[in-house]
Structure formats: C-alpha cells, structure tokens
Image: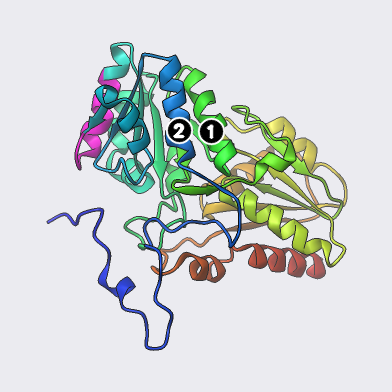
Amino acid sequence: MRRSKYQRPAHLDAPEPGAPRLTTSAMIASIAGPGQATRPAPFGHALVELAQQRADIVGLTADLAKYTDLHVFAKAHPDRFYQMGMAEQLLMAAAAGLAREGFLPFVTTYAVFAARRAYDFICMAIAEEALNVKIVCALPGLTTGYGPSHQATDDLAIFRAMPNLTVVDPCDALDIEQATHAIAAHDGPVYMRLLRGNVPAVLDEYGYRFELGRAALLRDGADVLFVSSGLMTMRALEAARLLEADRIGAAVLHVPTIKPLDEGAILKAAARSGRMVIVAENHSIVGGLGEAVAGLLMRSGVRPPAFRQIALPDAFLDAGALPTLHERYGISAAAVAASAKSWLRAG
C-alpha cells in the first residue's frame, strides 16, 4: 500500500535519550534562522493577486494544497481550484488539457513526485507540446527531514534535460513573489522550485528584482565568487559576511533561472582574474547548476584559478532535523564559509 504523504516516520518522533525533542515537523520545518524576517506563503498570495487580474488562471494539486501554499488560492478562488487526489500523472494530464482549452494552470505537488512519478506525463503531455503549464513544487533539495522518499535532490538534473522546459530556483519570499508573476507572463511550460510556509525575506535589502533568464550580482568581492541558486544564495550571502571577519572578499552571483542559463553574466563574473569560483546549490553534485556552470566555462575557455562545488552528495540522504542535516552535508552558512576558507588556503 502506498504510504500517505502526510504520515510522519516513527523514528523522527523518537529522539535519543537526553536529546531535545523536535518542535517542528520534518516535513514543514522552516529554513529561516532565529529572528530572521519571513513572509507567509509568498507563492499562494502572489497567485491570488495574479488570479484577480487574470480570469484564465486555475490551480491544481495532488492532495497537497496546504503543503504547497495553494490553499491560499483555493480559499480565495474555490471555483478555480482542482483537487486531483494522490494521482500525479492525472494531475499533469489534466493541466495539459486545461492549457489546451485556453486556461493557465498552476500545478503544485512535491518536487520528488513531479520529477519521479510524473516525468513522462510532463514530458509527453506538456513539454513536447510546449503547453502553457506552470509546475510549482515544494520540498526541493534538502528542505525536509523525511529522507529519500521526499528529498528532491535530483530534480534539477532531471528537468534540465527536458526540452522546452524553463527551470527556476528562487531564493526567498521576494524571489518567489516576483517569479510567480514572471512565469505567468512567460508563454511556455515552467518548472519552479518552491520554498513554502514562512519563507525568509533576504533579497529586499539588495535592490533585487527577478527577471526570467537573468542572474543578479548581489555583492562583489575580490577573493571568491559564489555562483548560487535557491536557498544557497541565502547561505552564500551569510557565508560572505562570515568571511569578512577573515578579510576575505566574497562576491555572490544569484542564478534563479537554471534553464535558460544567463551565460553572459556568469562568464563575465567568472572571467575576473584571480578569483576562485564556487558554485553552491541545494541539489546533488550530479547534473545541477554546478555542472551547468562548469560546462559553460569549459566550452567558453574561461579558466578561473580554481573551481569548486558545494552541493549535496551523490547519495540517498539521511532523515532528521534540518539544521543538523544542513551541517552534515555542508550547506549551512558556517559550513559554506569553512569550505571557502579551506580551499583558499590550499590555493
């Protein structure tokens, strides 16, 4: 029998003797740090705003409205919301049919279910026909402690290889809000990773604005260049501040659109002499942003002094509390800063 997506693994409710009991679900744990500013359900509220302007927008989900923030849209527009049940293939096929009839479907599920269970339906029913369907998926990379069944560590590799599909990996609440509007205006299928719930607000202070297909240099620095996407842009910015204490200047180039890649911005930033390039991503080291950037640099003849990757290992990851897992797998701010310092010392 297929296990419910809502069922909590028993071992997460049984901490070791003396260990503090987790106070948040591993499924919906926030990635926000203590005291960090957040905004609730940025995708859901942005979609409601869009739907007030566009009568063609509909929302569909596979039994996960609450866990993808689509419940905000469902409450505001119940007549334009479709609950498809635990049937991801049917979800994608129905969205394709609605797009053919002139609607603009926003489809939500977990990234693992879209990438693994519904891949062929997305490919044949949506991407091959270049239909105007927006697939917005929660729990990207290591943003849940539920283990390999729910950790989408390979979704970028899977969807980067699909023709006609635009791939977006937003950083924070502002990025998600603006990206939702941008992908609605874009004619064609889109896969967007989603941070849900109380999402950190980080980019407001950098004068940032999301542009589909464009990277943004958020800060400059002479010693190291972080090229990052998704939540790892938050971590890169935090790591850059930590590195300042050691008089290490770190630049951060945020790449929210994985496909098509902003090749010009990446090449310009990476070509600056004397600066190590570190690609940081919340994804397997195989097939994601790191390999996309490495391939671009090689094809273009741009050779920085050193090229390194901060990414998740090519392995099935552990279950547990997110802060612990982020430290274990080297994607916390402290771990990112430590890796950069060790690589710079090693030359």
> What's drawn in magenta, residue-wise?
84-97
Q: Which residue is at the front of the view, 7 or 295?
A: 7
Query: Residue 147, located in which quarter of the rendered image?
Result: bottom left
For mark 2, give the secondary structure.
helix
CA gap between label 2 and label 1 equals: 8 Å
The amino acid at mark 2 is His
Reading the image, the residue beneath label 2 is 45
Q: Nearer the viewer, residue 165 or 103?
A: 103
- Mark 2 and mark 1 lie on one chain; the one further toward the N terminus is 2
| Residue corresponding to mark 1 | 177
Residue located at (46% from left, 24% from top): 49
Q: Which quarter of the picture shows residue 114?
A: top left
**Label 2, residues with CA under 10 Å away: few <14, some 14-19, many ≥20:** some
Q: Residues within 10 Å of mark 1 (few under 14, many from 20)?
A: many
Q: Main secondary structure of the magenta part?
A: helix
Task: Give the vertical position of 166 relative to 240 (above or below).
Answer: above
Q: Amino acid at mark 1?
A: Glu
- Percent position (x, y) of residue 257? 58, 34
Q: Is residue 93 magenta?
A: yes
Farthest residue in the bottom direction?
17
Check whether the beta carbons of the residues at disc 2 and disc 1 lie within 8 A of each other. Answer: yes
Disc number placed over residue 208 in the picture, else none:
none
- Place of residue 3 in the rendered image (x, y in percent of width and height, measured from the top left): 19, 57
Horizontal relation, residue 90 to residue 55: left or right: left
Can residue 163 be seen at all in this image of the molecule?
no
Image coordinates for residue 193, horizontal then vertical, percent: 47, 41
Left or right, residue 53 beside residue 280? left
